[in-house]
Image: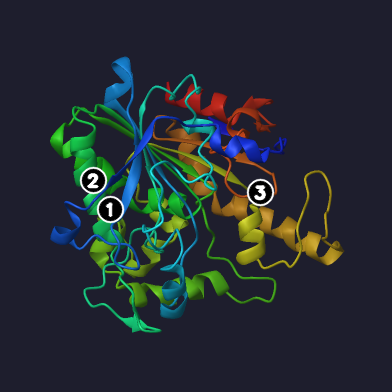
Amino acid sequence: MLADGRGSILQMPATTKVRGLTNTIMSNLSDRSPDVGAVCLDGSTPGYYLRSGSGSNASKLLIHFLGGGWCWNLADCEQRSHTIIGSSTTWPSSIPSQFYHDGVMADDNPDFGSWSLAYVIYCDGSSYTSNLTTTPVYNNSKVFFRGRRILDGLLASWSTAVPDVNEIIVSGSSAGGLTVYLHLDTIANHFQSQSPTTRVTGMVDAGYFLNHSNTQGVDTYGNEAYAALPVWGVLPSSLDSSCVVKEARYQDCFFAAVAFQHLSTPVFVTNSMIDAWQLGNVLQVGCSLKTGSAGSCQAKQLTAITQWQTDFLSAMQPVIHRATTSTELCGVFLDACPIHTETCGLSWFNYTAYGNNDNVTMAEAFHQWYF
């Protein structure tokens, strides 16, 4: 299904942040960390929150990778290592209230509320690509770059936490969405090597980050990413093997638009064409749009945003082409809402897109494509 156009906004009250899930428990990788070196930036034990499914859906697993951007250099990563997205030392026994876990993950979601859920807190700052064998020190603090090893530990843990799993949806938002583009085939291969009939599907939220210049013509995002890869110790084995063998530079496989073209696992893509984070951090437009108005943006900035939307739609053409020619392999839902991430809140049930699928919500679009 292809949906595009202007999405409608429903503002999410703060109270809905904790409405979505109940009965989750914290599962850590302490039994695997010493073996594979799977640790957060500060060396603490990574983990995830698990909700057990019910009935026939207990053997179906929804995985969600939390976002949180990236740390681009050693100083940035050392600072992050003292926060909740760089260290597990302050993780509570249930999902922290500041992280959205509604929408597709909600207990009352009629499609997936009874599925088992693995909600992964992000603590490596590299979308699970870092793999540095040494441990650099900054400000008298050791910094561990072990994201890919965390992913390996998660896969091993899920194989025992949800035995006999036969259906898996791998979702993620923001940097967690990029994680899906980068590692979906790896995750699918892991589970299908154990049971070839296991159905694995990706669902990406706001993870299609463009390697695009800012308003001054500088490729800030791309330059930061390329510079970070050696800091993180990213190896060809850290990234999708199909991409690595076909691209002239394996480092290019860190970017969503490149990684997508080599994906073989079915995937559903959701994204805003005027994603607020990308307007601020990639385009660096210097203003904020509001729903239905220009917000603080002036005429020159609005022109830059209009051109960005055109460029974004152009960059999405491989996704749109696959969605329209191989519907079993790809679906896409695009909107023009000036926000970032959309599947983890009430927007999942309320955002609509105009065009060929007028008034179809994200939830309805994914349901129609998946089922």
Query: How busy is the neighbourhood of tag 1: few (under 14 within 10 Å), some, or many (20 plus)?
Result: many
Q: Where is residue 219 in the image (x, y as percent from the top left)?
A: 57, 74
Q: What residue type is labelled 2?
A: Leu
User: Which quadrant does the C terminus fall into?
Assistant: top left
Q: Name the residue under label 2.
A: 155
Q: Where is residue 29 in the image (x, y as percent from the top left)?
A: 24, 51
In this rendering, is residue 82 above or below 176?
A: below
Name the one closer to the observer, 283 or 66. 66
Q: Do the residues labelled 1 and 3 touch (CB within 8 Å)?
A: no
Q: Is mark 1 on a helix, strand or loop?
A: helix
Query: How busy is the neighbourhood of tag 2: few (under 14 within 10 Å), some, or many (20 plus)?
Result: some
Name the one closer to the observer, 304 or 70. 70
Q: Are marks 2 and 1 in contact (CB under 8 Å)?
A: yes
Question: Which quadrant of the figure has residue 214?
Answer: bottom right
Distance, label 3 to label 2, CA atoms, is: 31 Å
Q: Indicate which disc residue 133 carries.
A: none
Task: Tell which circle, 3 or 2, labels the residue nearer the N-terminal end.
Answer: 2
Name the one closer to the observer, 37 or 323. 37
Q: Residue furthest top?
A: 55
Question: Which quadrant of the figure has residue 147?
Answer: bottom left
Q: Mark 3 points at which residue?
A: 339
In this rendering, is residue 234 above or below 24?
A: below
Name the one closer to the observer, 357 or 61. 61
